[in-house]
Amino acid sequence: MKKLIPVVLVFMLSCKGKNESNKITKTLDEYFTAQQHLYHFNGNVLVAEKGKIIFQKSYGFADYKKERLLNDSSVFELASVSKQFTATAILLLKDRGKLKLTDSLRYYFPELPYYNISLQQMLTHVSGLPDYESAMTGKWNPDKVAFNADMIAFLANEKPPVYFAPGAKWLYSNTAYAILASIVEKVSGQTFAAFLAKNIFEPLSMTHSRVFNTRRSTSDTIANYAYGYVFDDKQKKYVLPDSVPDLRFVYYLDGIQGDGIVNSTTGDLLKWDRAIKNHSILSEESQKAMITGQSIIDTARNYRYGYGLFVEKNELGNIISHSGGWPGYATMLTRNIDKDFTIIILSNNESHTGGMSIAVQHILAGNPVVMPTTHKAILLDSNALEAFTGVYKANSELTIERRGTQLFRILPNGAATALSPESSTHFFYDDGSDRQIQFEMDSNNKVRKAWVIAFGVKTELIKIK
């Protein structure tokens, strides 16, 4: 009988664990299904615990026109999630003694007029290098696809100035990562695509992953490709970005690699995440440095940048992550280091993958999440709106301002989003995103408490003015 008790206990704990897992799976599917139906989420999701998949599902189309559905093997443009592969390539060459992070940019490209910038500063976004995308706009032939060599030659000839002295502050730099990819080519003697394939994708059996900066070629295509779509307000439908005049850069900047252009699947990215955890590619020292904050973004939030990864400690634990955005795509790869939860969300219609990733983290932590729901605007007396105005603070400051008969949320950069009332104290964002602001009033009709609800995660707002 004494021997039976431990067996029964193990069985009961096993059943409890299975029930909790089933509950999480059901909640995740409910959440993403609602995001699809109410907010047009289109993409693939994978959630893993300790490397084991606990949720994986596809929502929507890989090709809107042909109504070809997404599946687990659909290939997405990763955009800036690609930067961790570029960083790994540089660190791998360092491990092999082929370069040093203290090497200067001009050691490899002496024609560039940017002095005293190290590879370390380029990896960690403190180089101050000018943005090649904005510099080339209006000066580059939009009918010609630019590649890295073209971009470097353009910077050498045009000489746009640095934004600040190297190391003076943090500023995200696509230019730095594109040039890093070209340094990989110079040092290795291989194309960037070939180097990643031989040294990362093939050893990890990432069979659906590759650099794809030749998508404009009809002879080089990817099977099961998830085409990226943007919403056209004029046509009121999702279209390919190539057809939008304001997005012509998706054509002429399509050849640039290093800051983006790695294409992959949720399954391959899980293999990659495990390689980071287990330092399967890099030395243990380099891998640890990659996921350690190397530069400071926000001291108050304990928000830093490693090598190709954002590093943060918050109420959920120690988090490493990176998002990606390019017309038609929004991507997110996140891991909670403490709990070893991996969250991968790839969207091919620019859905809010970052906000949804945070919601998933809260679901996994057992925290309440407000499920997406339908919102319907009502009329409120414009004078009543004045009670909600003021400056509020959560992670950052925001201002609630009345303009005539409408409330607006204003960010520090001036970006304004209209807020529509669905009750006397509950407002939703007019931009079609899953975000609301809720107020609690006192007996004098003054704000006692306020919350922002972003993609299901409810955060208190403190009124400071």
Image: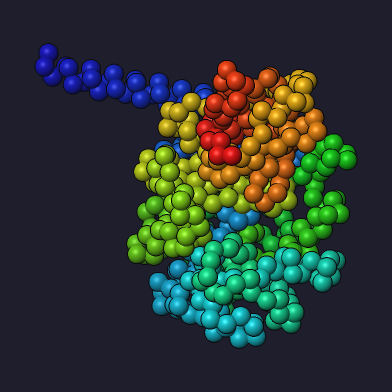
The front one of 222 and 316 is 316
Q: Please, is residue 35 above or below residue 7 in the view? A: below
Who's the residue at 23% across and 20% down the image?
9
Residue found farthest to the front: 444
Q: Is 441 on the left or on the right of 400, as rendered?
A: left
Q: Could you tell me residue 138's position as x and y percent?
A: 83, 68
Residue found farthest to the left: 2
Q: Could you tell me residue 17's position as x and y percent?
A: 35, 25
Quadrant containing the C terminus in the rendered view: top right
Q: Could you tell me residue 113's position as x and y percent?
A: 64, 83
Who's the residue at 34% across and 20% down the image?
15
The front one of 299 and 122 is 299
The front one of 15 and 239 is 239
Who's the residue at 77% across and 32% down the image?
406
Residue found farthest to the right: 234
Q: Is 300 on the left or on the right of 263, as rendered?
A: left
State whether residue 34 appears in this view.
no
Q: Is 205 on the left or on the right of 431, as rendered?
A: left
Q: Is 71 on the left or on the right of 449, as rendered?
A: right
Quadrant containing the N terminus in the rendered view: top left
Q: Please, is residue 114 above or below residue 349 in the view? A: below
